[in-house]
Image (cartoon, helix red, strand yellow):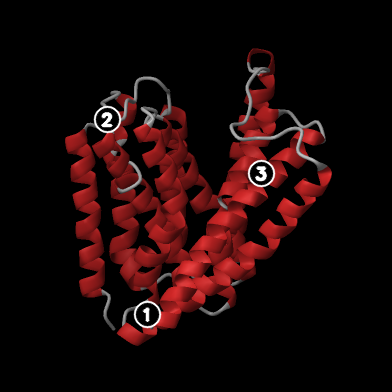
Amino acid sequence: MLVDLVKIAAGLGLLVVAGDVLVKGSVALALRLGIPALIVGLTVVAFGTSAPEMMVSVAAVLEGAPAIALGNVIGSNTANILLVLGLPAIISAIRTDEHDTRESYVIMLGASLLFILLCFTGPLGWPHALVLLGALALILFRQIREALAHRANRAEEEIEGADIHMPWAKIGLFIVLGLIGLPFGADFLVDGASSIARAFGISEAVIGLTLVAVGTSLPELATSVNAAIRGRADVALGNVIGSNIFNLLCIIGVSGLVGQLPVPAQMLRFDLWVMLGAAVLIAPFIFYRWPFTRMIGIGFTVVYAAYVVVLMTSGMV
């Protein structure tokens, strides 16, 4: 088991580092090619930050563990709301009156309902994948069109951490390291997680919903906690909503093109509805601009801990 834990730790480390350098290299490349920063933010950054989760899900499908792929997305979306919003709120209350996320939130709810509907017509395969990717394409097209329409008012916006003067050699190195590191990290994580599931008699679905999901959500959690420490916890809300949309439409969409994803009965009965319930839970904070207070943060975190306990006690096979 020690070897499997080392594989998981190494896999997560590789995913975080490789994903970070891939995003930096890809953003620098796009900016050097003259692509506007606002378009880069909507496309390159969005896809790049989802690359670790995508590689994990694709690797899981290729290695015959599709339950881990599904669990990774469903569990990540649940953790993003209850944990990635809950923990920063404990540190510093998250204000919701500074950014209007209502439209993005409605899109997230729509993506969640579409995904659940497709799951009940599963197993998920290439037809379902095309529907999800088509929905993502429509959303991106609309966002890019709106961004271009308001380009004059947003011309001075920059992408945080982007280096427009990065040397070409460094850009190439970052992209190559990212493209090499991501599949290796995903392979280590999936292999280690699958071995632990078999050793303890826990279903791969539960491992995907918990260990893998939280592991791939660590970058978002770290970003949100750091933002809370710096008094900018409000940025977490938009990041969570955007991440959840990409998880459902892009990651499952790509994974469905690689192979079939049978949906375990447990997910149809329970986990999909927990994911949807968590999404609905934050509706008052979005539409009525309620702040995420410390007590709300504690409540969200406790609910997530209870969910994990239920999974672990019911996930033995």
Q: CA distance from mark 1 to mark 3?
A: 34 Å
Which residue is tagged 3? Answer: 24
Q: Identify the element where label 1 is drawn.
A: helix
The label number, if any, that marks residue 93 in the structure image: 2
**N-terminal label among 2 and 1:** 2
Question: Compared to 202, does 83 lie above or below?
Answer: above
What x and y, as percent, mark residue 297?
23, 40
Q: Nearer the viewer, mark 1 or mark 3?
A: 3
Q: Is residue 136 left or right of residue 10?
A: right
Residue 263 position, x and y percent, is: 43, 70
Check disc 1 and report the residue beneath it: 197
Crowding at dot 2, Cα within 10 Å, few <14 / some 14-19 / many 20+, comes out as many
Q: Quadrant of the C terminus?
A: bottom left
Horizontal side of 76 relative to 174 (left or right) equals left
Q: Is residue 84 left or right of residue 103?
A: left
**Percent position (x, y) of residue 112?**
42, 49
The answer to whether marks 1 and 3 mark residues whose Cβ atoms lie closer than 8 Å is no
Q: Position of residue 115 (x, y in %)?
A: 46, 54
Decide: few, some or many residues near mark 1? Use Cα within 10 Å; few <14, some 14-19, many ≥20: many
> Callout 3 environment at 10 Å: few (<14), some (14 to 19), or many (20+)?
many
- 289, above or below 223, in the image: above
Instruction: Determine whether the residue tagged by mark 3 lies in a helix, strand or loop.
Output: helix
Report the front residue among 122 and 316.
316
Q: Amino acid at mark 2?
A: Ala
Where disc 2 sits, the SS reads loop
